[in-house]
Image (tube, grey):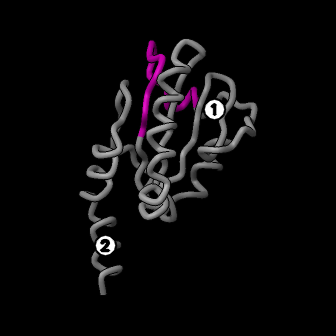
Amino acid sequence: MSAQELSSHKWKDRLLLILNTENSKSLHQEQIKILQDNIEGLEERKLVIYSVMPDQFKKGIGSESWMKSARLNDRYRQEGKEFEVILIGLDGGVKLRQSEILSIEKLFATIDAMPMRRNEIRNKSR
């Protein structure tokens, strides 16, 4: 389900996967708060958020609907990492991966430097 779920976003949305465990819930909550405070910027950059636990995931920042599946966790979590943030571009490739809170400035700067995003900005200003 997860690979199919993510592939439905290809060429339409950028994805931010927030992988955490019970031990890193506070980091997850802090990351979500940063994102919630910048909803407009996320929408402008076509960013869809996935929260991923070892045996479940949910799509969207405000969603409380967890879906049972370990596939996203198994596919993306690096061994031994309690917390990771992974940015996936429109092409489906991993553009950024880090094991600490991702600042909104770094997230937006990374996306805004991408060629397809620069095209979006150029086309929007016409």
What residue span does the magenta drawing correspond to?
73-86
Quadrant holding the N terminus: top right
Q: Name the residue under label 2.
A: 121
Q: Which amino acid is tagged 1?
A: Arg
Q: Mark 1 points at which residue?
A: 71
At 50% across and 37% down in the image, what residue appears?
A: 33
Above or below, comparing residue 59 to residue 77 in the picture: below
At 57% across and 26% down in the image, what residue appears?
A: 74
Left or right: where 27 falls relative to 68: left
Of mark 2 and mark 1, the one earlier in the sequence is 1
Judged from the image, the secondary structure of the residue bearing numbered disc 1 is helix
Q: Position of residue 124 (x, y in %)?
A: 35, 79
Q: How far apart are marks 2 and 1 (CA)?
A: 34 Å
User: In the orientation shown, which residue stands out farthest toward the front?
Assistant: 37
Q: Where is residue 76 in the image (x, y as percent from the top left)?
A: 49, 31
Q: Is residue 15 magenta?
A: no
24 or 117: nearer the eye? 24
Q: Quadrant of residue 98?
A: top left
Q: In which quarter of the image is residue 87?
A: top left
Q: Is residue 75 magenta?
A: yes
